[in-house]
Amino acid sequence: MPSARALLTLLLFIASLAAGHARAGEPVGMRPLEVPSPARGARLDGSLWYPAGPGGTPGEAGGTPVFRATPARLGAPLAEGRFPLVLVSHGGLRSAPHMADWLARGLAAEGMIVAVIRPPAPASAEAALAEIWLRPDDLRTALDSLLADPALAPHVDESRIGAVGLFLGGTSVLALAGARLDPEGLRGACDTPGRAMDCGWFAAQGLDLHAAELGPLAKVTPEPRLRAGVLVDPEFAALMTPESLRGISLPLTAISLGTAESRPPALDATPLLGRLPGLDTVTLPEAGRFDAFALCTPRGAAILAEEEPDAPLCASHGRAAHHRMLLAEVLAGLRRGLGS
């Protein structure tokens, strides 16, 4: 007999499958988002996706020659009412800055206000390493800013705040839930091939993790306003301290894309099993990690092949269907803590 959660996910998937094309015309608004970041000494940009009231201009966001744009009513007012607020952090932003827009739009179509936070692309290996502790701060700072916005705050149900993280963004959500990265484990992350994603880049730039300054890791603290978190192929899951995982009470869902054989070891969430109470786990074996990225244009694969003949970013087949499956699982994970 299927579990209640499995039935809920199936119903959400069937509904999204049936409405997949119609949803492009539903009232989802989008407007640019700017968040001052004291930790970075700069402004973060991003986008806010939300159930829209009448008005705005039909348009698109984030299109490039490689990746398709995402439709929205640009500048539309928020619909009347109060809605859950979901923070989204995507770890694949070096490929393009709008990788999470498709997911944000899907969540907004289900009645959620969604803030996509886009940190600057790191210019060096040292800057990339600092993203581990800066991105959780990005999400917290964005939350502070959104709740202080007099135009937005009346529409936010502050008892229903969630976060979705993909790849390094998943690591950030884990950190805000209370997980702690073991500094010594991180220092040795590149000693074993495949254990971390950026080891080749670190080595090429002469960054030695054993000599790196990791003190800021200790300054990352839990975010008590979160009520649910979803992690899609989070990085560094094996390096979280067991005692910090045992102390987490937040409902978390870990979604794994692909099979254990096809998934990079650095994106393996299974080390969280048995150490994180209440963790719900889902595997989408038909999908791959690039299915968490935006849809490619008809010429996207050819454009990428000009620089890298076997570029995998647009090689996935069935990405639109995998998007629907992933969206359904993310919704189910959020609703564990936020309700319907």
Image (cartoon, rainbow, N blue to C red):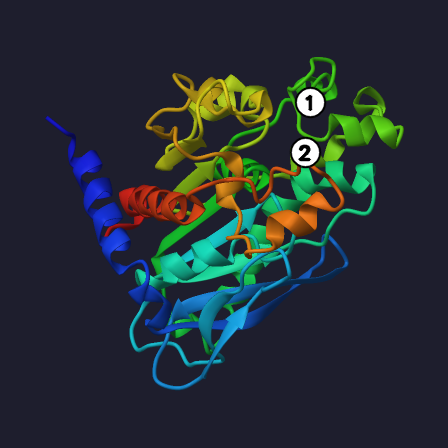
Task: Name which residue type carries label 1.
Answer: Leu
Q: Secondary structure at mark 2?
A: helix
Residue 93 seen from this side: no
| In the image, farthest residue toward the right | 206
Report which quarter residue 28 is drawn in. Answer: bottom left
Q: Residue, x 89% and y 28% (percent of image)?
A: 206
Residue 217 numbered tag: 2
Q: Which residue is mark 1?
A: 186
Q: Earlier in the sequence, mark 2 or mark 1?
A: 1
Quarter of the image where the N terminus is located: top left
Quarter of the image holding residue 120? bottom right
The amino acid marked with disc number 2 is Leu
Marks 2 and 1 in Cβ contact (< 8 Å): yes
- On the image, the x and y values in percent for residue 220 come to 62, 39
What SS does tag 1 mark? helix
User: Label 2: how many residues lie within 10 Å, few (<14), some (14-19) or many (20+)?
Assistant: some
Determine the residue positioned at 46% across, 57% down.
102
The number of discs equals: 2
At horizontal 59% and vertical 62% (from top left) the residue drawn is: 46
Relative to the observer, which residue lies in front, 298 or 147? 298
